[in-house]
Image (cartoon, rainbow, N blue to C red):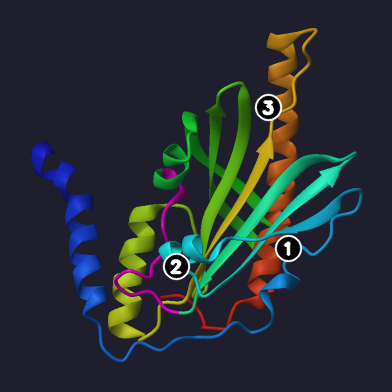
C-alpha cells in the first residue's frame, strides 16, 4: 500500500496534464487591470522594471508579466515577478520555480512553507533558501488565481484539472519574491544568521503586499470550489 501511495501524486499530475490538454472550450480570461499596477513602488526603495526576453517568454508561455528589482543605495534589495496565464493548455502552463531555479544554477538549501497574514486573509506560501556560489537568497513563491492562493504544486495541478473540466477557465498567476541575503564579512556565521533573518522578514512583508496587489489585478472568478 505504501508503494502505491508513492505513485499517487505522479498519477494525479499525469491525468491532469492530459485531460487539461484535451479540454475543449476553455476561455482566455483577461486581467481586470494592468499587471504593472502590482507593487509599483515601495517606500525607501527605487523600483526598476526588468525585461524578459522574447525567447524566454515563449518558453514560459505567459500571457503577461511584470518583473522588477527594488534597489537601495544602488544595490538590489529584492526582486519580484508576476507571470500571468490567461488560460493554461499544453505548452502554455505555469512552470514551477522548484524545477526552474535549480536549472538556473541555484542549489536548494532548505524548503518549506510559511503562513502570511494580509489585508485579504491568511495564506500559506512556499519559502526556499537557495545558494549559488557564495550568494544566498530567500525565495517566496505561490500560485494565485480563481479565488485561491496555493503553495502546493499537487493542489495547483488538481485545481487546474477540476476547473478546466467544470468551470471552463484556468487563468492563474505565478508570484515570486527573491531577497538576497546580506552577511557581515567580519562575522560570517553570525552575520549569515542575521542576514537570513532580515531577508526572511523583508520577504514575508513584501509577499504579503504582493498577494493583496495581485488580487486587485486578477479577474474576478467568484469563490473557489
> In front: 194, or 66?
66
**Residue 94 covered by magenta stretch:** yes
Distance, label 1 to label 2, CA atoms, is 34 Å
Q: Is residue 1 left or right of residue 225?
A: left
- The quadrant in which the N terminus is found is top left
> Is tag 1's residue or tag 3's residue first in the polypeptide sequence?
1
Q: Secondary structure at mark 2?
A: helix
Checking the image for residue 2, the label placed there is none
For the residues carrying marks 1 and 3, which lies nearer the camera in this image? 3
Q: Is residue 2 left or right of residue 180?
A: left
Q: Which residue is mark 2?
A: 58
> Is tag 1's residue or tag 2's residue first in the polypeptide sequence?
2
Checking the image for residue 196, the label placed there is 3
Residue 120 visible (yes or no): no
Q: Which residue is mark 1?
A: 119
What's the magenta region?
Answer: 87-98
The percent coordinates of residue 168 (x first, y second) are: 35, 86
Q: Secondary structure at mark 3?
A: helix
Q: Would you identify the image quadrant in which residue 99 lies? A: top left
What is the crowding at mark 3: few (fewer than 14 residues within 10 Å), some, or many (at least 20)?
Answer: many
Residue 153 visible (yes or no): yes
Amino acid at each position: 500500500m505504501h508503494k502505491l501511495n508513492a505513485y499517487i501524486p505522479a498519477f494525479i499530475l499525469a491525468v491532469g496534464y492530459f485531460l487539461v490538454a484535451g479540454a475543449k472550450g476553455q476561455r482566455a480570461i483577461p486581467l481586470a487591470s494592468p499587471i504593472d499596477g502590482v507593487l509599483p513602488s515601495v517606500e525607501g526603495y527605487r523600483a526598476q522594471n526588468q525585461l524578459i526576453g522574447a525567447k524566454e517568454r515563449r518558453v514560459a508561455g505567459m500571457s503577461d508579466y511584470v518583473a522588477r528589482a527594488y534597489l537601495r543605495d544602488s544595490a538590489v534589495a529584492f526582486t519580484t515577478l508576476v507571470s500571468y496565464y490567461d488560460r493554461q493548455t499544453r505548452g502554455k502552463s505555469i512552470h514551477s520555480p522548484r524545477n526552474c531555479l535549480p536549472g538556473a544554477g541555484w542549489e536548494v538549501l532548505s524548503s518549506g512553507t510559511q503562513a502570511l497574514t494580509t489585508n485579504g486573509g491568511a495564506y500559506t506560501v512556499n519559502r526556499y533558501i537557495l545558494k549559488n556560489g557564495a550568494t544566498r537568497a530567500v525565495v517566496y513563491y505561490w500560485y494565485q488565481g480563481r479565488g485561491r492562493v496555493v503553495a502546493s504544486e499537487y493542489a495547483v495541478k488538481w485545481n487546474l484539472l477540476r476547473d478546466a473540466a467544470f468551470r471552463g477557465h484556468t487563468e492563474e498567476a505565478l508570484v515570486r519574491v527573491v531577497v538576497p541575503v546580506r552577511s557581515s564579512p567580519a562575522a560570517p556565521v553570525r552575520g549569515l544568521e542575521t542576514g537570513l533573518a532580515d531577508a526572511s522578514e523583508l520577504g514575508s512583508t513584501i509577499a504579503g503586499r504582493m498577494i493583496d496587489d495581485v488580487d486587485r489585478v486578477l479577474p474576478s472568478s467568484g469563490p473557489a470550489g
